[in-house]
Image: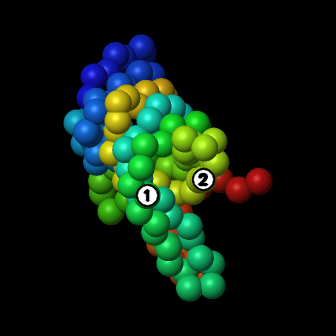
Amino acid sequence: MNFQRFDHRYQLRFMSGEKAVATLLDFCRAQGIGYAALSGLGAVSSVDLAYFNDETLKYETHEIAEQLEVIGLTGNITIKDGAPFAHVHATFGDRDLHVRGGHIMEMTVKPNLEIWLTRGTEEIVRLPDEGSGLYLMSLPEMA
């Protein structure tokens, strides 16, 4: 992965064959990022795409092994169990222009993925939520 920093923002370019989520988390760990918002686009050769089933409280993961365009990618980086955690959703288009989307578990870049990362000034931590079984953002203020 290559990157360029602009104050508190980063432009990231992932290379063909890279595992995007693992590479992103390694980058955030190395940069000491405790919170960031992200968006992106590009293409992948495979993706592990998930849907959260609120009845079973588990992710249902679907492995898709085909060339797909990343139409839109959005998410954030927070801290879970002391390490960076990526919560990322995306939509993908196939060669017939059909669209699929969901929660990204991992994806393999091919040929390119571009992510715009905007770093926050404070760390945001995720803590377990008994009701959903998920790790949710722990935010101190209420409306």
Label 1 to label 2: alpha-carbon separation: 10 Å
Closer-to-camera residue (67/135): 67
Closer-to-camera residue (70/122): 70
Amino acid residing under circle 2: Arg
* Label 2 secondary element: strand
140 sits left or right of 104 in the view: right
Closer-to-camera residue (89/82): 89
Residue 74: quadrant of the picture? top right
In the picture of the structure, the residue carrying the numbered disc 1 is 64
142 sits left or right of 57 in the view: right
Image position of 80 with respect to 114: above or below: below
* Label 1 secondary element: strand
Residue 6: quadrant of the picture? top left
- Residue 100's disc is 2
Q: Position of residue 131 (x, y in %)?
A: 60, 81
Image position of 2 with respect to 89: above or below: above
Q: Residue at x 43, y 58 (%)?
A: 64
Amino acid residing under circle 1: Ile
Q: Are marks 1 and 2 in contact (CB under 8 Å)?
A: yes
Badge 2 density bin: few <14, some 14–19, many ≥20, Cα 10 Å: some
Badge 1 density bin: few <14, some 14–19, many ≥20, Cα 10 Å: few
Tell me which label, 1 or 2, sits earlier in the chain.
1
Q: Position of residue 35 (x, y in %)?
A: 45, 41
107 sits left or right of 117 in the view: left
Q: Residue at x 35, y 35 (%)?
A: 110
